[in-house]
Image (cartoon, grey):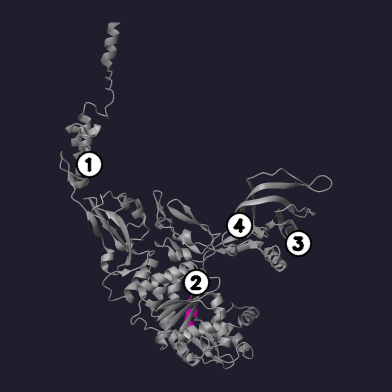
């Protein structure tokens, strides 16, 4: 049974064209109701009992969820048409956008993989005794509390454990914190008067599920607001401490932790042979969840907060974001643009936002101008991982312009970098970041924007992020003849080799993590495939002659998909068997430097071995009197006749 859209014009405050929506979405729509959440609630109940429905209302979701509970049916889906489309200065022209939003709501979305995190309620409070002891007293009935007092305050209760010391390090997240403590003193409960304390010792270890930081100093972890289970408050702020106590009491039980990113170690270009190449994700991760693990990086899923910046800047697609996967995001953008055009819309703009942006849109719709009729909002859990590939893909799908609406807490490092890269490929005036805290200012900026012409023939880019970016770039630059110049940190580009300096040692080939640099087993030759180059710089780092230069660019021609020769030389022919080996110029240079001067090659016979292939050189060495491979003569084989001869002699 197909899903049905339940439409409502919200007391006549918006215009809803059910026929156009049904035609553009290929969906079944109810008639347009006026008060579905109040006077017509019985009608809603009947429709919900008849089958799967999506209610076109974002404001009264709780009313319909409660109704579903009473009826014993599955809760309906929801799509907000009113705030995002109907309530607008251009609401009369909102039918194409409403159809697009409805079609997106009908699109099934994948479930983000997750893992269970168990917190048994062991709590570690760090702070001055006067504040920490009072908080511990209140939490001790629900949590297993240990207080690390950072001053000389004396505890008066044994309802919780107390130690003194200082924190050397703190790692982990909810359900799995580990602490290293120095100058640790443990309370000795026996005796009269004040409690005694043990001698201080360094390097003590402890573990817990929850950490409450009341030290009022530098946080013990990176991005403390993003570390689950790590709660922090100013010890002088009583309101904040009360809030912290309430939050801590809720952190007991089993929780689902989304696995935001997936790591493919074999694709990582972090390091080869102890030579560091790409460190983009390490440099940009705000929580410290990414660490070096030899030739690749490792991601701690418990610490990862899901910002997605690592996936956005990963040049090799070794890190992929899963909330949602890029394929699901592209499907949403495709259905929005396609449905908008099918409903007779002309040049849609895409506004990417998070929950904060959704609230700004609602406020603008209720009290201001709302969104322009051609601006289609796309809500994501986080927007900091919306990279150049997604931006270019949106333009390739047929959006005239793409904007990202920032929130006060948005991580901007990756967005700024990815926007510059996307603009270098797509051109100016098609992409932007909206940094407005006021809903009216946001609306005014959107209404004042110049809207460029969208792509005349939209395409559907598929594959991983690199493939998506290339396909979108080809659609956006159909007449490009020369490679597009890119910013210095771009993940696409060429390698230039100074042939006068290059000795064809092929060290660069052995370290290239993506296979962009390739040798030729039949002759001294260095080949390069530009499409595979990550611009990680490992080849430039390892080159002993400093002969390699990186050129950030994007070649959209087919030549980038095939190998091109960067340097080649004539091979040397073995003086014994004629087999080709090595590089002629290198062999001649070695002969010039070593022959007759180095002790190992003082005679002409020994110098001649420099000009031999491996097999002939080994054979020649075996023929020498001072053969380095020669061993003692093999002993004579003893036979039966030898034994008989010895008996006759005796």
Q: Are marks 2 and 4 in contact (CB under 8 Å)?
A: no
Compare marks 2 and 4 and give the one earlier in the sequence.
Answer: 4
> Could you tell whether 300 is left or right of 557 in the image?
right
- Secondary structure mostly taken by the magenta-highlighted segment of the chain: helix
Residue to which mark 4 is pinned? 220
**Residue 226 % position (x, y):** 58, 64
Dot 3: element: helix
Q: Nearer the viewer, residue 113 or 237?
A: 237
Q: Position of residue 293 (x, y in %)?
A: 47, 52
Q: Quadrant of the C terminus?
A: top left
Residue tagged 2: 383
Image mark for residue 590: 1
| Cα separation between marks 3 and 4 | 24 Å
Q: Sequence order check: which comes first, mark 1 or mark 2?
A: 2
| Residues at marks 2 and 4, CA–CA distance in whole angstroms | 27 Å
Structural crowding at the residue carrying mark 1, measured as other residues with C-alpha within 10 Å and reported as few (<14), some (14–19) or many (≥20): some
Magenta span contains residue 604: no
Q: Quadrant of residue 173?
A: bottom right
Residue marked by disc 3: 138
Reading the chain from its start, which is encountered first: label 1 or label 3? 3
């Amino acid at each position: 049974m197909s899903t049905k859209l339940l439409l409502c014009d919200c007391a006549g405050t918006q215009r809803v064209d059910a026929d156009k929506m049904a035609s553009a979405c290929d969906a079944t729509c109810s008639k347009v109701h006026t008060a579905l959440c109040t006077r017509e609630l019985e009608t809603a109940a009947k429709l919900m009992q008849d089958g799967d429905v999506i209610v076109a209302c974002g404001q009264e979701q709780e009313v319909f969820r409660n109704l579903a509970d009473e009826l014993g049916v599955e809760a309906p889906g929801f799509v907000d048409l009113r705030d995002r489309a109907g309530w607008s200065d251009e609401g009369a022209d909102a039918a194409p956008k409403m159809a697009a939003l409805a079609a997106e709501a009908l699109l099934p979305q994948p479930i983000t993989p997750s893992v269970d995190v168990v917190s048994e309620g062991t709590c570690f409070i760090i702070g001055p005794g006067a504040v920490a002891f009072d908080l511990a007293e209140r939490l001790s009935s629900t949590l297993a509390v240990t207080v690390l007092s950072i001053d000389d305050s004396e505890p008066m209760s044994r309802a919780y454990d107390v130690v003194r010391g200082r924190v050397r390090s703190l790692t982990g997240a909810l359900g799995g914190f580990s602490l290293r403590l120095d100058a640790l003193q443990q309370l000795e409960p026996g005796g009269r008067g004040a409690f005694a304390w043990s001698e201080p010792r360094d390097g003590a270890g402890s573990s817990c599920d929850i950490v409450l930081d009341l030290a009022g100093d530098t946080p013990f972890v990176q991005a403390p607001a993003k570390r689950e289970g790590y709660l922090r408050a100013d010890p002088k702020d009583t309101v904040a401490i009360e809030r912290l106590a309430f939050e801590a009491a809720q952190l007991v039980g089993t929780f689902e932790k989304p696995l935001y990113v997936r790591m493919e170690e074999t694709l990582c270009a972090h390091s080869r042979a102890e030579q560091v190449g790409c460190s983009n994700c390490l440099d940009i991760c705000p929580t410290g969840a990414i660490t070096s693990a030899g030739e690749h990086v490792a991601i701690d899923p418990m610490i990862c907060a899901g910002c997605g910046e690592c996936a956005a800047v990963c040049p090799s697609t070794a890190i992929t974001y899963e909330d949602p996967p890029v394929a699901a995001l592209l499907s949403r953008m495709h259905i929005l643009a396609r449905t908008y055009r099918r409903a007779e819309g002309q040049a849609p703009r895409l506004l990417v936002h998070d929950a904060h942006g959704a609230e700004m849109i609602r406020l603008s719709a209720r009290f201001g101008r709302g969104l322009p009729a051609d601006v289609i909002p796309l809500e994501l859990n986080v927007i900091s991982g919306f990279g150049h590939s997604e931006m270019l893909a949106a333009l390739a799908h047929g959006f005239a312009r793409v904007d990202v609406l920032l929130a006060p807490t948005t991580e901007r490092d990756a967005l700024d970098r990815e926007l510059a890269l996307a603009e270098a490929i797509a051109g100016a005036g098609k992409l932007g970041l909206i940094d407005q805290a006021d809903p009216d200012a946001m609306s005014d900026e959107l209404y004042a924007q110049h809207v460029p012409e969208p792509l005349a023939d939209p395409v559907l880019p598929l594959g991983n992020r690199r493939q998506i970016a290339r396909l979108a770039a080809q659609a956006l630059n159909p007449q490009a003849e020369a490679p597009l110049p890119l910013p210095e940190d771009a993940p696409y580009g060429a390698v230039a080799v100074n042939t006068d300096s290059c000795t064809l040692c092929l060290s660069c080939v052995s370290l290239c993590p993506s296979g962009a640099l390739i040798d030729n087993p039949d002759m001294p030759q260095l080949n390069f495939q530009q499409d595979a180059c990550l611009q990680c710089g490992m080849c430039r780092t390892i080159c002993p002659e400093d002969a390699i230069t990186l050129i950030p660019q994007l070649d959209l021609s087919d030549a980038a998909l095939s190998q091109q020769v960067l340097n080649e030389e004539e091979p040397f022919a073995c003086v014994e068997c004629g087999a080709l080996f090595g590089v002629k110029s290198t062999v001649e240079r070695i002969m010039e430097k070593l022959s007759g001067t180095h002790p190992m090659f003082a005679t002409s016979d020994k110098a001649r071995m420099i000009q031999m292939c491996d097999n002939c050189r080994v054979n020649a060495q075996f023929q020498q009197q001072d053969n380095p491979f020669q061993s003692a003569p093999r002993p004579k084989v003893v036979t039966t006749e030898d034994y008989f001869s010895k008996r006759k002699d005796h």
